[in-house]
Image (tube, helix red, strand yellow):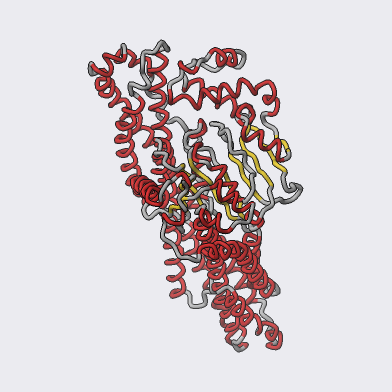
Amino acid sequence: AMAPLAAAVPASASDSAGAAAAAAAAISGRQRLGEAAAVLSAAAEALAPYPAFGSGVRELRARADGLRGGRFTVALFGAFSAGKSSFANALLGAQVLPVSPHPTTAAINRILAPEGDMKHGQAAITFKSLEAMREDLAYSFEALQLGAWKEGSWRAEVNKLKAPDVPPSGRAHFSFLKAAAIGWEHNAAKLGSREVTGLEQFAEYVAEESRACFVAGIDLYYSCPLTEQGIVIVDTPGADSIHARHTGVTFEYMKNSDALLYVTYYNHAFSRADRQFLGHLGRVKGSFALDKMFFIVNAADLASTPGELASVVEHVEGGLRAAGIEAPQIYPVSSIAALDAKRSADAAKLESSGFARFEAPFLRFISEDLAGLAVGAARHELQQFIARAEQWSETLAKSEEEREQLKVQLSLDRKRFLEELQLLANSDKEAEIAQETGELLFHVRRRLQFLAGDLYHEYFHPSLLQDDGGDMKRKFAASVKGWLAQLSIELEREVQATSLRLEKKCESLLAKEAEAWLVRLQHEIPALPALSIYATSAWLTPSVSEGSLEQGIKAVSYWSYFKNPKTFFEGGGKQRLRDALEEPLSDSIKEAVQRFGRDLIEFYAQETSARFAAIAASLEAQWEEWESSVSGMPSATDSDESWKAVPQRLHALHQALL
């Protein structure tokens, strides 16, 4: 019997009304961005006739354009079997994504509102490049210890491959190779191209593994209330896919998405892949301005009592806390019941599915918290222009004699200003960046050494190394390869989390230095104009090489420790192998961490220097505009009349953003 999900989590009785209000709130989210954009555009128009504000007008217009095209990216993460597709369908209110079967080679699918030439129901399919497909095939060959991948003979090799020869850890690679061999005739010619199709073909490319494995990504243009509010749903490959090694793509969505939904299936224990992915989420969570993570327990209608559901939610919470995710927002839902309810407009069913309870805070987060963050930044920027406008008003109010004095003063101060500006432009923060990187990577190295011991027992386990007629050398080599590949993925994730912390450190160094410089100059140069330090562009993520620990240790050198399963597991061989691997692995980890450390220091020192130079160039342009406007100021005071309304207009616009 299905337990009403509402009973498992305490909440107010007005939740159905809350869901309706939240749907309205999503609309207001995009409206708020549109209104803020209109305010900034109006401010730019008010200032446009005055040369003293030229760079500021360009800045305001650019910010307005960014807000006007505002999109909210919502990334879905979770294992294949978690039901991400059925959850996405419930969110969209329609059967958009095919739910079964789940290919283990999932591409990245984006669902967004129609735009440009792309109409409702059209899909743009981007196929992998031939080079990327070859890399994937070669990687799976190596993971299954099939020797080198050869263009002419690989399909014959795959056709000979039998399921019993494949260790459990290699099943995703086995499925991928089989699918690629089956689909090669029809799809190989499409590699490197892009194709526009309808919904039916889209479903085939998502659900049929022999097609899906050739696809890099699909953009589906689909009109529904959610997408029309600028929300883009991104369905990412699972942590257990063969693409898990491409940690960079997943990390970019983790870092840059506006909201992050992690879907887990009711009563499924977290797999090792899940636990390690959640650990990665835990490490990056503190670097975000807002808590943008929502955790979904799918198929919660399988609970027979509210108590059973509550204990499952508690178990999930314990797993998330263990991964370093404190106070997680967890929502048990039945996606299938929710989709049914939305399609039949059954509010009571939507309520009992638990979906309304998730949707209300989720949509509120987008419309209030995310939009609020963008509007707050716009408000701060406008405040800076008000300060400059008031200074211009004071300048215009000066007598003829005072204006002449100001022109002379600015001319005298320029040399001092440019000298000080050069010091700011040349600020060198490499020592602080190196110290922070060293401290962060010291802990990375320790965590990785500890994890190596844990993972060793999983990869050198009796269930993977049974003498059941398969090739034992191949199985042993696959265990060594799998162990090192997983450690490589963990090292890459650690380096990515470190890059996020370094980004925040560099932002802080930039802001402190620039603000302290400005405060000092305000005291030292009395005629200093009101200068603005504009936000710099988004930080790129340094590229992190894949498979950094896979090359240092060769399985063939350690085969003598194995001999057979009995002596290995009962005669101490497993411990002897671990001892023999300890030093070479430790050296590999040390070397890889040092290399990543050098790369991170160089990347962030260069990026920070470039940003100091950009801030200095912007401040110099503002000074030049100001000085040339003061120098060219007309002597007749009636030409100042048109200006008088401008500061009041800016104040009124600022009020509109509150």
Figure quadrant of residue 475: top left
Residue sitting nearer the eye, 483 or 569: 569
Q: Residue furthest left?
A: 571
Q: Residue furthest right?
A: 117
Query: How many dots with numbers?
Result: 0
The image shows residue 216 at horizontal and vertical percentages of 61, 35
Report the side of 423 relative to 49 (left or right): left
Residue 603 vertical placement versus 106 (above, below): below
Is residue 610 visible in the rendered image? The answer is yes
Residue sitting nearer the eye, 462 or 136: 462
Figure quadrant of residue 34: bottom right
Residue in view at x 51 percent, y 55 percent = 352
The image shows residue 597 at horizontal and vertical percentages of 39, 40
Is residue 616 visible in the rendered image? The answer is no
Residue in view at x 66 percent, y 37 percent = 203
Report the side of 169 relative to 652 (left or right): left
The image shows residue 83 at horizontal and vertical percentages of 52, 41
Residue sitting nearer the eye, 542 or 371: 371
Residue 312 vertical placement versus 564 (above, below): below
Residue in view at x 62 percent, y 70 percent = 625
Figure quadrant of residue 635: bottom right
Q: Quadrant of the C terminus?
A: bottom right
Residue sitting nearer the eye, 550 or 521: 550
The image shows residue 587 at horizontal and vertical percentages of 32, 29
